Amino acid sequence: METGNTQILKPHDEDRIPFILTLLIACLSAVLLLGQMTEPARGAEAGPSDLVKKGRQVFTTAGGVGCAACHGAYAEGDLGIGPYNRGVEEQKIRDALVSVEAMSFLREEMNEAKIKGIAAYYTWLGELQLVKTLAKRGRFIPDRLQIYPGTKVQLVIKNASSFPRKFGGGNMNIGTVKVAGRESLDMVWRAPAKEGSYTLECLDCRIKGQKLTLEISKSAKPHRGVKPAAIAVAAKTPAQPPARRNPEAVQKGRELFRTAGEVGCDACHGNYAEGDVGIGPYNRGFSEKKIRLALDKVEVMKFLKKELSDGQVKQVAEYYGWLGEHKLIKTVAVKGRFFPNIIRVHPGTPVQLVISNQDREPHAYTSRTMGIPPISAGGRERGDAIWTAPAGEGEFVLRCANCGDQFHKLTIEVSKEAEKFRPR
């Protein structure tokens, strides 16, 4: 048998070479042949270096909280608290430890080795194009992703089920992977140099036959890394004065936002329509016209057009309009400690305050001065409350009512120096 210049000898050639030597040469030839066949484009990439692995560990554990608590699980800034950090260099990390107040508790812990590890991890992340999909009942959202040929991809699969699920099959040559319930798994895969389609499917989901398609095409935007400063800038446009809302329609719209099509709009657009999942855009304040246009034009949303009646579309629009009238502010809570622990708002601002409880135990967060009911958040869940900042300046404090350490607090500073909120 010949493959290129590699020849595998057969055992019956004993008149020329002893059988054992022939067998050894054949094995060596097979190894060389496999080496020639193993294309980075057709399978999962080799793992990161030890320094990158150490940096990733620090990223998830630093200060008992991890950088991920503010910057997102993949340093993509998806939580709406810390910025996009993929590709950030070492000096910027050092500068942030000195200048960012919310990171001051990390200064003593972050020694030279940890800083260099984090920097190596961020650099490694910057080389990868982050693509995400959510799997729910076997359906992928989105179910088609376009990637430029030869791109190194960090593919994230989020399992929306409470049960572990297996993913594999198709022609990506990554084997079978298992994702725990309500968890995410990421893998590094290099797109092939040639155009084509590659697929992945859930092997044990309720709905069969659904696939995630990675379309390798030169029409896709090449990955060149993203400058964090560019990510932090959001377009701001003047908005019309808030309209009066129907409370019943808003509540029904919120329910539809979470359940429509057995998937919910939040699967792509985030729990509060803020676009923090990395799939769908920011939708707070979206008009009914824009929603209907998206149902007609956005491929992954077309199945919802049959699910939603005309009246239900109006209810979702009412909810989006209501969201657009409130400034969204978020904090992460870990064992009574808040990140960030100081938030500034302009007097008179209508606020939707979201607390993400990172503990496994449910907690209640209360304030004696804000005049709001306790905010309840289950283990690893979120809770939210609506509050309107007073017309005068001042400080308002909120604490965890049933955490082990009740010394820590969230302070909301109402100040005229804070940026004015413009409803969308």
Image (cartoon, rainbow, N blue to C red):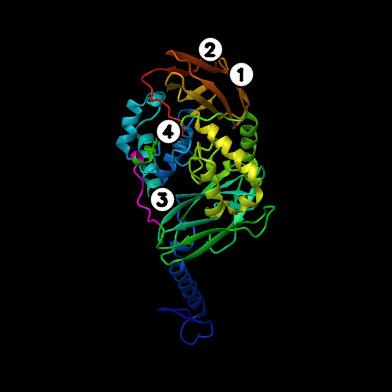
Q: Is residue 228 magenta?
A: yes
Task: Indicate the amino acid at tag 4.
Answer: Gly
Instruction: Pick the residue in front: 387 or 215.
Output: 387
- Amino acid carrying mark 2 in the image: Thr
Q: Which mark is residue 369?
A: 2
Amino acid tagged 3: Leu
- Between disc 4 and disc 1, whose residue precedes? 4
Residue 128, labelled with which disc? Answer: 3
* Picture coordinates of residue 386, whole percent (x, y): 55, 24
Q: Which mark is residue 82?
A: 4
Task: Name the one closer to the observer, 38 or 311.
Answer: 311
Q: Residues within 10 Å of mark 3 (few under 14, many from 20)?
A: many
User: In the picture provided, is 219 more to the left or to the right than 159?
Assistant: left
Give the mark nearest the N terminus, 2 or 4: 4
Position of 180 with respect to 332 (left or right) is right
Where disc 3 sits, the SS reads loop
Name the front one of labels 1 and 3.
1
Element marked by disc 2: loop
**Can I make out residue 157 in this image?**
no
Identify the element where label 4 is drawn: loop
**Do the CB atoms of the residues marked 2 and 3 lie less than 8 Å apart?**
no
